Amino acid sequence: MIRPTVLLQPSWPRPRQYSEGVAIKRRYLTLPEISNRLATRLAILLTLALAPLGSIAIYSELETWQARKAASESRLITRTVETVTGQRALLESAMLASDTLSQLVVDRLENTAACSAFLANFIADSAFYAFAGFIGVDGLMTCISEGEPVDFSASPTFAESVQNPRASFSFQPSGAITGRPVVLINRPVFEEDTLLGFLSISISRRSFDMIATAPDNENSPRISYLVNNRGQTLTSSDTPDADDFLPEPEMLERIINQREGVFTAPSYGGDKRLFTIAELMPGQLYVLGSWNAAQSSNLREFNYWRVGFPLLMWLASVAVVMFAVHYMVVRHLRQINRQLRRFALGNRAEFQRLPEEAPTELREIDSTFTKMARLIRRDEDEREDALREKTVLLKEVHHRVKNNLQLIGSILNLQLRRVTDTEARCILQGVQARVRSLASIHRKLYEQDRLSYTNATDFLETILRETLALARSEQAEIDVKTEFEPVILPPDKIIPTALLFAEALTNALKHAQAPQPDTPPRLTISFRARDGYADLQVRNSLADAGTGSVAYGLGQELMTAFALQMHAEFESGRVQDDQGHGWELRLRLGDSGLNDTAPHAQA
């Protein structure tokens, strides 16, 4: 199984070449990037500049609207009061009459007949009052303008009035004496600080209707009510559904407590209506107007367009600024940026110049970038030519070195034919093998198109193939198993690694033994990439574990020197596993450096 190629050493940046047809994935802008854009910043600055003027305009419009609203509400209240002008005057005259009569009635209380006659004459002379009577603190009404005496002692309302004596108004659908709908004006009568009783004057409903102001559908409320301090309506029109225009009791109580104002609330009929309240007599009498919401909405409606006008002006200003910035600056900057990006991605086509309508400053920047690109292209062409020349020269050097090493190998071969000493022949053969390995390495370097970083596996496979071809011609058959993966190494590590592998391979072939009778010796070689490291393992089989002493040879010294040169981990020794007995050499090359481990010799 072939694993991905691992680059063990960092490389310097190289320009990437892209064609015009390469699609670049669109990346969406984040909020910080949007906030850093020129148009966004100008919009923020313009907003800050216009904020004081906009605030003043909005505040002025709100103040004007508040003044118009207050004036409209004041007009509504005034029109509501105008609808009960005559009824109010009648109630006020009744209150003044009760104040005058109270002293006169007190002087006549001892003579009930004379007191009643006096009140009867008063009612006869009046054209609006229907009845008058005096109720003592015991609840008996004996001094009356007409009818028989009446006892109110059992009435809860009378008991409450005694506990809290004050002038009040109330409505009776059927008067106790007259039997007709009347409005009662009750006024407490005191002698010094002693409560003597209450003087009661009633006004018939007919009298109220006679002096009622005719409503104006355009400028008057739908219906008006006179209301006492307890929320009881004293008068209303004869409309059958008049009560449907009243607010609910809880809301009516809240409206009365405000004494004067304009309120929007649901009515008994379920419709949303506008109510106006005005105090006619402090703490005693109020007028309540019920308006159609549609009729009164134009008086209180807020014109949002007036407040929105500064906002629209701001939006228009921001839009104009952003359009101007985009048309005059941003689109030209983007054109420059696109050309610079293409140039950075390796496209060396001539820059497209900005149009004449572009601002002078941007055209100067564009001209500067164009000149810079031309200088960079010229320098790149010069560097490529120089690099091409150096590559050719370096390949020629490798070719000459390979030829010289092959010449040296031929000379050693001639020398071997003349040497008869066995030990000398072995030494010369070892030297010849090492020279041959070096020649193979330089031949591979000469054949490489790229010399900076190359696949070290190709070198090892070449050395293995040539070494096995030579070994099989000199000795018996051997079982070889390999596992190579692509591993990229720089030239300064490829040559020591290849030389160390050649020594390890020669050593393994020399000492390989058959693990069992009638089986060939086995040789296992692996070169793999593991977690950023290059791992080289060379193993040969042995017949048994062996008990011989350890000896160090030239090959072991050379492999140790090569490992130290590359700052790599190197170890070798006897092993025993499921494959049987053997001798294993392991080189671990990477960025971690060399761990000092004592090498073991095999021979």
Image (cartoon, rainbow, N blue to C red):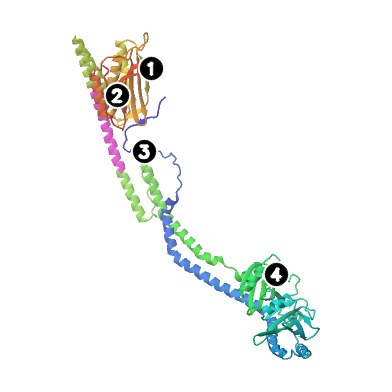
Tell me the quarter of the picture where residue 66 sits.
bottom right
Side of 318 relative to 457 (left or right): right
Q: Amino acid at mark 2?
A: Glu
Please state which of the two labelled residues, at mark 3 or mark 2, is closer to the viewer.
2
Q: Which residues are magenta?
A: 376-403
**What's the mark number on residue 245?**
4
Up-down relation of residue 509 to residue 177 (above or below): above
Which residue has dot 2 on it?
571
**What's the mark number on residue 579?**
1
Q: Amino acid at mark 4?
A: Phe
**What's the mark number on residue 313?**
none
Q: Position of residue 196 (x, y in %)?
A: 70, 85
Q: Position of residue 100 (x, y in %)?
A: 69, 89
Q: Quick one: 155 or 438, which is closer to the camera?
A: 155
Q: Secondary structure at mark 3?
A: loop
Residue 445 magenta-drawn? no
Image point 39% across, 38% down: which residue? Answer: 18
Q: Secondary structure at mark 4?
A: helix
Q: Position of residue 492 (x, y in %)?
A: 27, 29
Closer to the N terminus: mark 1 or mark 4? 4
Image point 39% across, 29% down: which residue? Answer: 4
